[in-house]
């Protein structure tokens, strides 16, 4: 992917899927279909991708016994445990990044769309780049 | 090697530690804690071990270590700094929301929550983004912090989403340590005065004990007070910032007055605050980027190489070989520009 810093150029358009804060501060992206993607990709498919990302983050932020034991053990070891192994949240974030990378290769790139890992933007938005020249 | 991000934070240890700008009060706090504890170990513990039990210095050591661990963890953890928006995001925001004629900086985004609350999200001029709920801009650190509680000078950093629990545990362990030292100072004086028959003689034998007792006595009130205040805040799931501004006390139109971020039960709120999941740092502190790319909130200083003195640095791979595909290298040792997207490494 060449220089992706310009919003519109001969090569690409950038759009941003913002966070959905209607249910609180938990990580959730707006499940909407941007109008710029009309005709390039099936509406349902795109929203499915966003929904899947949201489900991964929902799992990351869930209060479960696993998180509780993980944090208690970390506390008892003086938080040195956190230096040795990744937390459940970090694993989920990596899973989301892997999923986006797979979807890019499988579905989106052939249609000239490129989705960026939201972690690059501090989980504020999902950046989607559309290239104008079809492959 | 310490480098600067676009806010006033400092980064150490190759991106593993991020602290605030001013460290002087933090050093003072560390000094006070270390000096008082050392005096206790050197002057009180030998006598108390002989007279009472060898477990006394053991518990004191455990408490001291947990205080140091927690204060360092609070001071060196990214509190939840939000990376600044790129110019492209701003352009897109302005383009999509063209119903308003006011410039972005004067706009307020209304957020209708499922619970019925209507929140007003303000635009942050410095960070160039609409502040999400519970996010506040710290003028001392010059960054928007998630779940912003307050800026703590004793810790030299903001207290926010990612280091609140460490701050709370620091207060708890420091309260316990202070009380412990104070109690055993009194016990020491009492025991000595029983053996020597006057309190004045006992004090003259161990002047350090009086010094520690005084320090502990004067700090106990504020530390225990602060700890109780934060326990109360945790049970209500309210940040210090929201409590000071009375955010959830004023009636909102169309909504109820209960805090929408509370889970209803004080115990569950405690559990969520202290043992809940924590996101990794939003800043990719271990990547170096080209300055022209303008990807803010990552390190844009120079590295150790002499051939990158113009501020443009190379991107070096992490130990496990992860790269970011948007970063290129103009000069330097590591010259690969990854075309294929790979997951980032998390600090």
Image (spheres, helix red, strand yellow):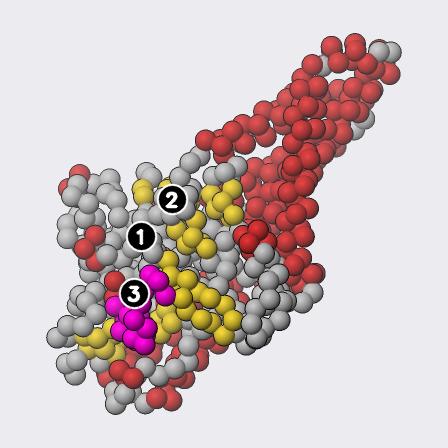
Nearest the viewer among B67 and B111 is: B111
Q: Quadrant of the rendered structure where residue A94 is?
A: bottom left
Magenta run includes residue B103: yes
**In this view, the mark in front (1 or 2):** 2
Q: Where is residue B196 in the image (x, y as percent from the top left)?
A: 84, 11
Q: Distance between the residues labelled 3 and 2?
A: 29 Å
* Chain that bears disc 2: B
Q: Distance between the residues labelled 3 and 1?
A: 27 Å
Q: Mark 1 points at which residue?
A: B298
* Chain that bears disc 3: B
Nearest the viewer among A39 and A80 is: A39
Q: In the rendered image of this protein, does residue B57 appear above or below residue A4?
A: above
Nearest the viewer among B90 and A102 is: B90
The earlier-in-sequence mark between 3 and 2 is 2
Residue depicted at 65% across the width and 38% down the height: B223
Q: Position of residue A1 (x, y in %)?
A: 20, 70
Please give the label number shown on residue B9. 2
Q: Is residue A57 left or right of residue B10?
A: right
Labels 3 and 1 in the same subunit: yes
**In this view, the mark in front (3 or 1):** 3
Residue depicted at 41% across the width and 46% down the height: B139
Which residue range is magenta in the image? Answer: B89-107
Labels 1 and 2 in the same subunit: yes
């Amino acid at each position: 992917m060449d220089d992706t810093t310009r919003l519109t150029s001969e090569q690409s358009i950038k759009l941003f899927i913002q966070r959905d804060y209607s249910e609180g501060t938990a990580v959730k992206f707006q499940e909407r279909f941007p109008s710029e993607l009309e005709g390039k990709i099936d509406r349902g498919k795109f929203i499915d991708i966003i929904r899947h990302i949201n489900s991964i983050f929902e799992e990351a932020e869930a209060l479960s016994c696993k998180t509780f034991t993980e944090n208690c053990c970390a506390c008892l070891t003086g938080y040195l445990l956190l230096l040795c192994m990744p937390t459940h949240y970090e694993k989920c974030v990596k899973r989301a990044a892997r999923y986006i990378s797979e979807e890019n290769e499988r579905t989106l790139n052939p249609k000239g769309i490129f989705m960026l890992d939201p972690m690059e933007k501090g989980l504020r938005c999902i950046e989607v780049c559309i290239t104008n020249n079809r492959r | 090697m310490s480098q600067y991000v676009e806010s006033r934070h400092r980064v150490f240890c190759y991106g593993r530690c991020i602290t605030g700008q001013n460290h002087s009060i933090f050093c003072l706090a560390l000094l006070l804690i270390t000096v008082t504890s050392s005096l206790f170990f050197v002057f009180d513990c030998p006598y108390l071990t002989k007279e009472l039990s060898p477990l006394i210095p053991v518990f004191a050591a455990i408490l001291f270590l947990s205080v140091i661990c927690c204060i360092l963890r609070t001071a060196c953890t990214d509190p939840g700094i939000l990376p600044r928006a790129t110019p492209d995001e701003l352009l897109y925001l302005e383009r999509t929301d063209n119903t308003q004629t006011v410039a972005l900086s004067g706009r307020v985004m209304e957020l209708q929550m499922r619970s019925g609350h209507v929140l007003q999200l303000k635009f942050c001029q410095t960070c160039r983004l609409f502040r999400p709920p519970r996010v506040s801009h710290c003028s001392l650190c010059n960054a928007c912090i998630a779940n912003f509680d307050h800026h703590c000078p004793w810790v030299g950093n903001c207290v926010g989403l990612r280091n609140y629990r460490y701050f709370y545990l620091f207060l708890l362990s420091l309260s316990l340590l202070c009380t412990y030292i104070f109690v055993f100072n009194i016990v020491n004086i009492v025991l000595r005065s029983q053996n020597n028959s006057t309190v004045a003689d006992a004090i003259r034998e161990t002047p350090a004990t009086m010094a520690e007792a005084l320090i502990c006595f004067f700090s106990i009130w504020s530390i225990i007070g602060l700890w109780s205040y934060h326990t109360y805040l945790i049970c209500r799931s309210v940040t210090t910032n929201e409590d000071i501004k009375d955010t959830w006390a004023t009636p909102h139109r169309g909504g109820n007055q209960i805090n929408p971020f509370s889970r209803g039960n004080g115990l569950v709120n405690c559990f969520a605050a202290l043992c809940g999941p924590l996101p990794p740092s939003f800043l990719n502190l271990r990547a170096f980027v080209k300055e022209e790319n303008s990807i803010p909130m990552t390190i844009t200083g120079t590295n150790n190489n002499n051939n990158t003195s113009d501020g443009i640095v190379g991107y070096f791979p992490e130990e496990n070989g992860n790269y970011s595909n948007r970063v290129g290298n103009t000069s330097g040792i590591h010259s690969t520009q990854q075309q294929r997207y790979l997951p980032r490494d998390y600090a």
